[in-house]
Image (cartoon, helix red, strand yellow):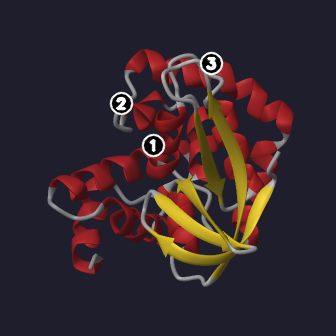
Amino acid sequence: MIEYIKGELTEVTPTQAVVEAAGVGYGINISLNTYTAIQTKKEVKLYIHEAIMTGGRDDSYTLYGFVNKQERELYRMLITVSGVGSNTARMILSAISPTELVNVISSGNERSLKSVKGIGLRTAQRIIVDLRDKMLASGLIADLQSSAAAAGMPVLSAEQNEVRDEAVGALTMLGFSPAPSQKVVVDILKAHPDMPVEQVIKQALKLIK
């Protein structure tokens, strides 16, 4: 079983990284969250989840990599939910950061989960029901919040998460990319926690590049 792969980052896209370790290049599927964290690095360490599919016409062996253990644990929790497969779990972690996802699930924010492509109301409800207690019991919430605080990252409230999602959705519809839009919106909410969504959007339009 592979715990992690550490080596030179030879190629990277928003969905895949190639890490060379001991002369072997490993193709590893990643989330947008992990891509953002590693895209400018030469050496990386990715925590691995191995997915082995057998019984079909062709067996498959796929590696999923995560920038830290907390993101990997979230991924493994997500794929235990009925109706959430590997690609859907990765899509969720690409649309919502691990800290924000924990906040979304612990607060029962169905709206934020439904904003992720491929997630309907029933699946969103199932994720919340199945994982809320598991996250509390595992200590994942405290771990992620401590990591976010140590890194100087804001931990948004449920109300701020809704404002963020609505603002990012509007900016995306206007043609801006989701990742930079989310960064600008989160920075605005950090500075102005009670700013209404329409003002957040107006402010973001002045700042986003």
| Residue 106 showing in the rendered view | no
Left/right placement of residue 188 relative to residue 90 reads: left
Q: Name which of mark 3 and mark 1 comes first in the sequence.
A: 1
Q: Name which of mark 1 and mark 2 comes first in the sequence.
A: 1
Helix, strand or loop for disc 1? helix
Instruction: Kindly report which numbered mark, 3 or 1, lies closer to the viewer in this rendering.
Output: 1
Residue at mark 2: 118
| Residue 43 showing in the rendered view | yes
| Residue 51 quadrant | top right
Q: Position of residue 99 (x, y in %)?
A: 63, 52
Q: Nearer the viewer, residue 149 or 55?
A: 55
- The reply to whether callout 1 and callout 2 are in contact (CB within 8 Å) is yes
Write the residue at 34% across / 36% down. Answer: 117
Marking on residue 129: 3
Residue at mark 1: 91
Quarter placement of the C terminus: bottom left
Work out whether 108 lies above or below 11.
above
Q: Position of residue 9 (x, y in %)?
A: 59, 76
Q: Nearer the viewer, residue 133 or 40?
A: 40
Identify which amino acid the numbered label 3 is placed on.
Answer: Val
Q: Residues within 10 Å of mark 3 (few under 14, many from 20)?
A: some
Write the residue at 22% across / 67% down. Answer: 202
- The reply to whether callout 3 and callout 1 are in contact (CB within 8 Å) is no
Write the residue at 75% across / 45% down. Answer: 141
Write the residue at 78% across / 44% down. Answer: 140
Identify which amino acid the numbered label 1 is placed on.
Answer: Met
Disc 3 and disc 1: Cα gap in Å? Answer: 19 Å
Disc 3 and disc 2: Cα gap in Å? Answer: 18 Å
Marking on residue 109: none
Helix, strand or loop for disc 2? loop
Identify which amino acid the numbered label 2 is placed on.
Answer: Gly
